[in-house]
Image (spheres, rainbow, N blue to C red):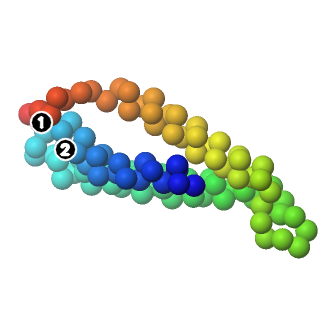
Amino acid sequence: MVLIAIPAGFFPMFSIVAKELNPPEYVGMSVAYLNFIAFVFISTYQNVSGEILKHYPCAEGSLAFPVEAYSAVYLFFLIGAAVSFAAVCFVPETKGKVSE
């Protein structure tokens, strides 16, 4: 669980990247759009995780899901992290210069 939470510390970096990759007159819109997309994916991941868990029955007399259910959810998170890592490899390096 802690390993999944570590990337949350990098969220402020996304705003910096959005600021550097867009013209100064569109910085507010680009940061707002990035924030909107982040919240869309957070809510989407919560719903998909719940749907994955619902496919595994709880033990008789228990509210806990089996270990396989959580493994499936973590696999979903791992796939999302791998796709995100692959996507970030295509972000251009600006060397600290704001685009004009």
Label total for image = 2
Say which element carries label 1. loop
* Left or right: where 18 falls relative to 39: left
Residue at 27% from the left image edge and 54% from the top image edge: 32
Dot placed on the residue nearer the N-terminal end, 1 or 2: 2
Residue at 17% from the left image edge and 29% from the top image edge: 95
Proximity of marks 1 and 2: CB atoms separated by less than 8 Å: yes
Residue at 45% from the left image edge and 33% from the top image edge: 85
Mark 2 highlights which residue? 19
- Residue 40, compared with residue 14, is above or below; it is below
Give the quarter of the figure containing the N terminus.
Answer: bottom right
Which residue is more in the foreground, 23 or 62?
Answer: 62
Q: Residues within 10 Å of mark 2 (few under 14, many from 20)?
A: some
Which residue is more in the foreground, 27 or 85?
Answer: 85
Residue 45 x, y percent position in the rendering:
55, 53
Residue at 42% from the left image edge and 57% from the top image edge: 39
Real-space CA distance between mark 1 and mark 2, rounded to the nearest whole angstrom? 7 Å
Mark 1 highlights which residue? 98
